Image (tube, coloured by chain):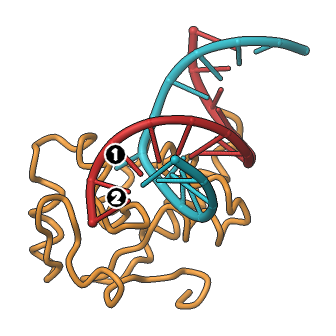
Chain colours: A orange, B cyan, C red
DNA sequence: CTCTTGACTGAGG
DNA sequence: GCCTCAGCCAAGA
């Protein structure tokens, strides 16, 4: 791991950790905030190492509000459970009222 | 250095 | 309205 790569990853973690309670954001939003607008996949990939970093990856979903990354969590519904615990309604991996709880770092941060 | 892959996204059928 | 294709960019083999 190079320092520079960690920087990119660290930024992702930093933004992810700044996501307010009961809010969610998308990979694309974070990527845009980092200046890598078309590297949304890198954001998701960065989350690959979010385990143990205290990063609420469960608050990061795709642009449709779909819990695409839940497959990377331990259980099948752990990600959904965490979100629901924060007041986020999730049905069938799909965040309800997504547009209202959406948190954009470039505007809120 | 080249090729593959991916927790995405937007456009087209 | 759902499914498929292509583009994107960085990391790993």
Q: As drawn, is A31 to the left or to the right of A49?
A: right
Q: Nearer the viewer, mark 2 or mark 1?
A: 2
Rendered location of residue A46, percent (x, y): 51, 46
Residue A107 seen from this side: yes
Residue at 9% x, 52% y is: A77
Quadrant, the C terminus of chain A:
bottom right
Residues packed near mark 2 inside 10 Å, few (<14), some (14 to 19) or many (20 plus): many
Verify CB contact (< 8 Å) between mark 2 and mark 1: yes
Residue pointed to by mark 2: A57
A30 or A66: which is nearer to us?
A66
Residue at 54%, 80% (x, y): give it.
A105
* Chain that bears disc 1: A
Q: Quadrant of the N terminus of chain A?
A: top right
Give the image location of residue A18, x and y in percent.
Answer: 44, 77
Q: Is residue C5 left or right of residue C9?
A: left
Give the mark, 2 or 1, whose residue is nearer the N terminus: 1
Residue A35 appears in which quarter of the rendering?
Answer: bottom right
To the question of a shared chain for discs 2 and 1, the answer is yes
Residue at image mark 1:
A51
Residue under the image location 50 percent in, 42 percent down: A45
């Amino acid at each position: 791991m190079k320092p520079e790569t960690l920087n990119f990853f660290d930024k992702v973690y930093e933004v992810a950790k700044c996501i307010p309670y009961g809010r969610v954001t998308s990979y694309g939003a974070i990527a845009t905030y980092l200046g890598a607008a078309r590297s949304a996949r890198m954001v998701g990939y960065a989350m690959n190492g979010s385990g143990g970093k205290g990063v609420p990856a469960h608050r990061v979903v795709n642009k449709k509000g779909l819990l695409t990354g839940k497959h990377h969590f331990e259980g099948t519904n752990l990600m959904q459970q965490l979100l629901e615990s924060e007041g986020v309604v999730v049905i069938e991996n799909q965040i309800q009222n997504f547009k209202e709880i959406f948190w954009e770092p470039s505007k809120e941060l």
